[in-house]
Each structure stands twice: as C-alpha cells, then as structure tokens.
C-alpha cells in the first residue's frame, strides 16, 4: 500500500511537470486530487485495513496528498506568472508616460441661469411646469387673446410643422413663447375642457414654465431663431398688481443683488391687462448711463401683467372670482447682461473657448 502511494505520487508529479495550460491543470487536479482520485480511493479503503496498518497508511496518504496539493499550487502560480509575462511581452505599455487628464464637463451658461431662476422661484413656492414645444396656433395665440391676423402676431413669426392647409386657422407650429403653457397648466389644474361650464373651486396656481422657444426671425447679435424663456403664472383669489410687483422686485434683488432698484413701465401684451415691462437699474453704471443701458440707466428684464380675463376664462378660471399675474423673461438676455456677452450667437456656436469661461 505504501509503495503504491509512492508510485502514485511520483507519476502524478511527472505528469504535472509536463502541463503547460490551465485546462490541462484542471484535468490533472480532478484526476489526482478530486473525489474519484486514487488517493481518495486509499482513504476510502482505510476501513478494510488492520489496526496496525491504518495509522501508517493514513499518515503516508495524507503526506502524499499534501505534496500533490503543494505542487499543484506552485504549478498554478507558475502558469499565472507565465501568462502575465506573455501579456507584458505582447501588450507592451509604457507606464512611465504621463496620463491623459479627464476632461471635466460643465453646465452651459444658460442652464446655469435657468437653474438659478428655478431656485429663486422655488423658494417663493413656485413649481416647475413643463409644457410642450410643438404647439397649435390655438394655444400659442388664440386662447392667449391673439385672434387670427391680430397685429401683435407680427412680433412672433412661427415655424410651421405641417404644410397641409386642412387645419385652417389652427396650424401646428413651434411655440414662439412659453405663454401657451399658461393655458395648458390652468386647464390641467382646473380640469376645464374648453366647454361652456367653468369648473367650481379650481385650485390656485403657482408655477414657472421654462423651455425652448422658436421664432422665424433674422439671426442677429441680439436675436436668434431658438432661445429659452422662463414664464411665471400665479392664479388664485385676491391676487393683485402689488403681488406682481413684490414678487418680481424680490426676484430681481435675489438674482442681481440686494441693492438693485426696479421700475415698471406700462406696455401691451394681448394676454395681460394691465401689462408692464420691468427694468432694473443698470448695474454697469449704477444708473448714470453707459453703452450697456444705452445711456438710459435702466435695463429691460422681463414682460409681465395681470392675467387677462379672457385668458383666465380660457384656462377654466372665472375672472369674476379669480385673478392672477404672469411674467416672461429671457435667460439669454439675463446671462448676456450679467456677463457682458455681446453676441447671442455664442450660446449656440459650441465654441469651448467661450463655454469654458462659465
Ligand atoms: N410671451 C411674451 C413674449 O414672448 C413674454 C411675456 C410678457 C410673458 C408678459 C408673460 C407676460 O407671461 O405677462 O414676448
């Protein structure tokens, strides 16, 4: 039995010496160390041995198994090392070369301004409401009190999505401003379907409507065919022009600095009455007059007004019970003023020399 173990061990070791790959090594392990191996057979046969033989054979078998295990581990390590050496030879890599730095991304300056605006209005209790960019003439104009052929449409020439004339006065267009979101959001809040009866007790609205707008216009340093707006809408009971002025003046102080002065100038928008534009005191010259404010001392920041009764009604809010204010601003313009950027086209030129400055 003891001789048998010796032979077993030496044949296994000779075989092992010739092995050169992992698959063969695994086969060897199963044959010589596995559950059906000859050594395991010796252990299994112990019960048939005499009392005297048992410890001797047990010891020898254990030693043989241990020797095979050690040899196996060494072989496995050697194969691994050989594979590594081979890989190092074939995939030569100069680890002394300096690494390539990872490019760090950044937020587009307009995104930064928009997020700043969201944060300020969020603190005042306004939620962000996302509305569609592809609109109908009805929502973009008619429900906002611009009838077909109204002269105020002159300011907002659209991109038409469908050329078919079947839709008559209601073609599909890219929205020219975020204001159609006023109707969409009021209708969602109130549940109004556009019919004859207005819903009872519709909930109050406090939202901002950010997003991309499109106008068919010549591209210049001050206007582009694509730009962002942030619209705001507050509807409820007893909302007054004082609420509008307070909210927007506070907004101006939060975004431009606590000392900034504001003024409201009467204006006209079809969907608000009365309407006003808000100016802030020019922060470049502190109101003295310079080229940025065209010597007026003031910079126009946004349009605003009390929501027109027709618009409230189109959204499902009875104008005899509810009132509201709305405003709309252009993040491009605000960003240009804050950073003294002279050409709006930089925002879309994708020039890293420009973008990396923010
Ligand atoms: N929709 C207007 C525009 O694009 C901006 C505007 C003005 C929005 C006054 C408003 C508002 O909500 O009250 O020119």
Image (spheres, rainbow, N blue to C red):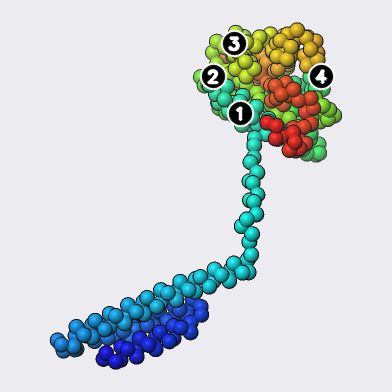
Identify the mark nearer the N-term, 4 or 2. Answer: 2
- In this figure, which residue is indicated by the disc labeled 4? 151
Q: Quadrant of the N terminus?
A: bottom left
Q: Which one is earlier in the sequence, the residue at label 3 or at label 4?
A: 4
Q: Which residue is mark 3?
A: 246
Compare marks 4 and 1 and give the one earlier in the sequence.
1
Q: Secondary structure at mark 4?
A: helix
Q: Nearer the viewer, mark 4 or mark 1?
A: 1
* Mark 2 / mark 3, whichever is N-terminal: 2
Sequence-wise first label, 3 or 1: 1
239 sits to left or right of 71: right
Residue drawn at (75%, 36%), measured in percent from left and top?
Answer: 353
Towards the viewer: 126 or 219: 219
Residue drawn at (53%, 73%) of the image: 82
Question: Residue 277: where, in percent of width, then height?
Answer: 71, 13
Task: Please name the residue that numbered disc 2 is placed on.
Answer: 124
Which numbered mark, 3 or 4, is in the foreground of this view?
A: 3
The residue that label 1 is drawn on is 115
Task: Answer left or right for 161 relative to 109.
Answer: right
At label 1, counting other C-alpha atoms closer than 10 Å, the crowd grade (few under 14, some 14-19, many 20 or more) is few
Disc 2 crowd, CA 10 A, few/some/many (<14, 14-19, 20+): few
Q: Between marks 2 and 3, how big is the CA–CA gap?
A: 11 Å
Q: Pick whichever, 76 or 334, lies toward us.
A: 76
Kindly report which numbered mark, 2 or 1, lies closer to the viewer in this rendering.
Answer: 1
Residue 264 position, x and y percent, is 69, 9
Mark 2 or mark 1: which comes first in sequence? 1
């Amino acid at each position: 039995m003891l001789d048998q173990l010796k032979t077993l061990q030496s044949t296994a070791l000779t075989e092992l010496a010739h092995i050169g790959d992992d698959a063969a090594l695994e086969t060897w392990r199963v044959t010589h160390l596995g559950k059906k191996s000859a050594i395991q057979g010796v252990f299994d046969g112990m019960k048939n041995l005499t009392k005297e033989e048992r410890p001797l054979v047990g010891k020898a078998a254990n030693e043989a198994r241990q020797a095979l295990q050690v040899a196996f581990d060494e072989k496995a390590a050697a194969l691994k090392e050989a594979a590594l050496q081979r890989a190092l030879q074939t995939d030569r890599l100069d680890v002394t070369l300096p690494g390539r730095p990872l490019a760090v991304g950044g937020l587009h300056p307009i995104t930064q301004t928009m997020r700043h605006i969201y944060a300020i209005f969020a603190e005042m209790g306004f939620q962000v409401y996302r509305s569609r960019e592809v609109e109908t003439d009805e929502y973009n104009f008619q429900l906002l009190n611009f009838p077909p052929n109204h002269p105020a449409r002159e300011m907002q020439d659209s991109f038409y999505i469908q050329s078919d004339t079947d839709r008559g006065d209601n073609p599909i267009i890219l929205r020219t401003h975020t204001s159609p979101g006023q109707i969409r959001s009021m209708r969602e809040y109130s549940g109004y379907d556009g019919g004859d009866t207005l819903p009872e007790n519709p909930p109050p609205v406090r939202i901002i409507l950010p997003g991309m707008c499109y106008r068919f216009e010549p591209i210049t340093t001050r206007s582009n065919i694509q730009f962002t707006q942030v619209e705001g809408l507050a509807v409820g009971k007893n909302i007054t022009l004082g609420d509008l002025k307070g909210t927007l003046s506070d907004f101006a102080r939060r975004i431009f600095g606590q000392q900034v002065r504001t003024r409201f100038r009467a204006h006209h928008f079809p969907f608000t009455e009365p309407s006003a534009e808000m100016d802030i005191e020019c922060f470049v010259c502190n109101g003295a007059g310079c080229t940025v404010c065209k010597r007026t001392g003031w910079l126009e920041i946004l349009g605003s007004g009390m929501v027109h009764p027709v618009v409230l009604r189109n959204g499902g809010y009875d104008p005899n019970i509810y009132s509201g204010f709305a405003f709309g601003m252009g993040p491009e313009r605000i960003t240009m003023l804050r950073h003294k950027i002279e050409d709006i086209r930089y925002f879309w030129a994708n020039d890293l020399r420009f973008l990396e400055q923010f």
